[in-house]
Image: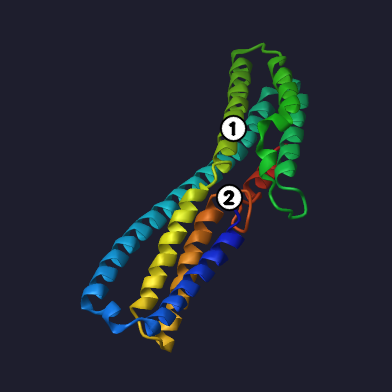
Amino acid sequence: MSSLIVAPALFAGCLLAGLLGLTLRRRLAEHHLDSDSRAVVTNITGLIAAMSALLLGLLVANAQSSYNTVSDEVDQIAANMVEMDRALASYGPAAVEARALLREVATTEVDRIWPPGGGAARAEAIDPTGTEASRMKLLGMLGALPTQTDVQRSVQRHVLELLAANGRLRVMVMNQINNDLPTPIVVVVSFWLVTLFLAFGLLARTNMVVVASLVIGAASVGGAMFLVLELNRPFGGIMQIGDASPRAALVLMGR
């Protein structure tokens, strides 16, 4: 679900609903807008506003938490790559080939997800099956390292654990970025907000202050929906996770 489509559509829908309410107010007979009727509309509007604010707040908080989690996992994968490289460097000459392959695999994976030249991130490239052959080759090379001392055995075990940890992290990232916001939630929240703006227009008289308030309010709820949808797409859209951390890890590897 594209944030660049849903958010402007919600902004337009809320604003048009508010303007429609202003138009209907001029056409309604006064007894439809007496104190009793206004009280009912006000109470229902307050109920819908409370539900909308609560749900929007929860959606933004949940989307931000998910975005931060994915970002932290990407940083952890990058840190694990550097730690594996450092561990292999301490292993000795026998690990030179494995260390070179590790950097090659890491570079290939980073370039697949974030194409060189500033291209947009490719969420589908997160799928660990795309580099399974390279990982298996690296795993076999690590397992074949000669372990003549306790230190070498400890280093080998540590590197294999880090490689397995990165595999698990990539699966977790892939599962989280495919967990898009359900369409029914967007539809229900949008309906509530459009209804609210229609009620706002019915309860107000047409003037520039009211129209400006409707525009600002519609832009605000459209912006909130934009944030929710963008944060749910950490490898797409305008607010995608960048490649700064993995690229920095590649620079450190091999030194």
Kindly give the residue lying farthest to the left in the view shown: 36
Quadrant of res 169: top right
Could you tell me residue 69's position as x and y percent?
50, 43
Which residue is pictured at 29% across the width and 83% down the height?
A: 30
Report the quarter where the C terminus lies. top right
Task: Give the vertical position of 203 relative to 165 (above or below).
Answer: below
Instruction: Mark 2 or mark 1: name the one nearer the start of the chain.
Output: 1
Task: Give the vertical position of 210 relative to 109 (above or below).
Answer: below
Q: Residues within 10 Å of mark 2 (few under 14, many from 20)?
A: many
**In what element is the residue under mark 2?**
loop
Front residue of 4/31: it is 31
| CA–CA distance in space, label 2 to label 1 | 16 Å
Left or right of 72? Residue 89 is right
Could you tell me residue 243's position as x and y percent?
66, 49
Which residue is pictured at 32% across the width and 83% down the height?
A: 29
Task: Give the vertical position of 7 relative to 102 (above or below).
Answer: below
Front residue of 59/35: it is 35
Could you tell me residue 3's position as x and y percent?
58, 58
How are the colours assigned in the image?
A: rainbow
Could you tell me residue 200's position as x and y percent?
37, 74
Which residue is pictured at 56% across the width and 60% down the height?
A: 6
Amino acid carrying mark 1 in the image: Val
Residue 43 appears in the figure? yes
Q: Residues within 10 Å of mark 1 (few under 14, many from 20)?
A: some
Amino acid carrying mark 2 in the image: Arg
Kindly give the residue lying farthest to the bottom in the view shown: 207
Which residue is pictured at 75% across the width and 20% down the height?
A: 94
Residue at which label 1 appears = 171
Quadrant of res 131: top right
Residue at which label 2 appears = 233
**In what element is the residue under mark 1?**
helix
Residue 255 appears in the figure? no
